[in-house]
Amino acid sequence: MTKALQEFAESKDLYYAVDFASSGSSQIGGNIGTNAGGIKVIRYGMTRNQILGLTVVTGKGDILELNGGMLKNATGYDLRHLFIGAEGTLGFVTKALIKLEKQPVNLTAMVLGVPEFNSVVALLDRFGKALNLTAFEFFDQIAVDKVIAAGHTKAPFDSQAPFYVLLEFEAMTEEVLDLAMSVFEQCAEDGLIIDGVMSQSVGQLQELWKLRESISETISVFTPYKNDVSVLISHLANFISDIEQIVKDNYPDFEICWFGHIGDGNLHLNILKPANLSKDEFFEKCQTVNTYVFDTVKKYKGSISAEHGVGMTKKPYLTYTRTQTEIDYMKAIKAVFDPNGIINPGKIFD
């Protein structure tokens, strides 16, 4: 499991940087298959950035030992990266050489309430330039309300805001903390922040993270229809505005819960089921929303799947992100490694 590797790394005073709420149930093979990201991507990158070597068995039965853990290897195609994110369609990963990082020092978090989504993007720019961020997450008031109502944690401060930012950084010196406060004060003066709080201990850090990490579990009881999409950071504000208008116009009774890894342009759109609809009725209506959402993703040249893969659910929508020429090349690659189509058939494309 991801959690087991994280704990092993910690026992060696090291750090496995791929982290997300489901680390206790996710598997390393699944991380590799989907090129999983999580909450630390802004600092450490995706799973792809952590894999130094792979041993794989292809659909032809060939055993490939790829890269052998080297940091530099400029000898033609790096086949390792074809298997990362391939959702198990090219072969079986039997061994992975994984890079571990040094443990981050004195992690400190700030939760900021912001008046509009444009402020979220502005805060990313300002804090990103001033601090070496390890995370930059966002969520909305609906998510906060649900998490607090479920008893996972308390409100970070008395005031409420349409959107929230959780940013994390290494406060290795007092100067870094002073700089963080200076940026905060300037942003507040400029109207980018309604209210905010900074962790003063490990316990407070963990409590603030519950606001973000508890969202998925909390909203599961509302039968959310989920979309995991990404667009360039410069398009985020317009994208969110477009999607909210789409849902409001077509399904005014649907409640939207937004959260995501805003530091890398990854948004999780969760449409919550109204109590008066059955699950089947709700999902059928959401299929219509899907088309509108993915049309908007295509409009902004984004991705219909930022970190959860394509599988079978998003297979019909692959052309919203990939051209037919790209898909043809992907199918040709699949045929080379798995000519009989026996490795995870039916995933990504037919």
Image: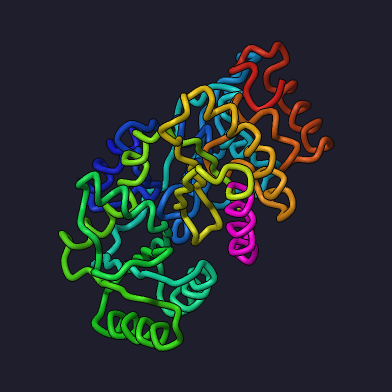
Q: Residue 30, percent across and down?
A: 46, 31
Q: Nearer the viewer, residue 338 or 143?
A: 143
Horizontal side, residue 48 vs residue 301: left or right: left
Q: Nearer the viewer, residue 16 or 187?
A: 187
Q: Which residue is rendered at x = 42% and y = 59% of the image? A: 137
Q: Quick check: can you spot residue 52? A: no
Residue lying furthest front: 276
Left or right: 303, with 49 as reference point: right
Query: Is residue 19 shown in magenta?
Result: no
Query: Can the viewer see residue 155 in this picture?
Result: yes
The residue depicted at 40 percent of the width and 77 percent of the height is 193
Query: Against 311, is 80 above or below?
Result: below
Position of residue 159 measured from the top left corner of the image (x, y, whole percent):
29, 70
**Residue in the foreground of this view, choosing between 19 and 312:** 312
Quarter holding the N terminus? top left
Query: What segment carries the magenta color?
Result: 231-247
Residue drawn at (52%, 75%), measured in percent from left and top? 122
Number of numbered labels in the structure image: 0
Q: Is residue 62 above or below residue 229?
A: above
Does residue 55 sit above or below 200 in this rendering?
Answer: above
Give the left or right position of residue 5, taking residue 127 as reference: left
Identified at 15% across, 59% down, the residue is 203
Query: Is residue 244 rendered magenta in the image?
Result: yes
Q: Position of residue 195 (x, y in %)?
A: 32, 75
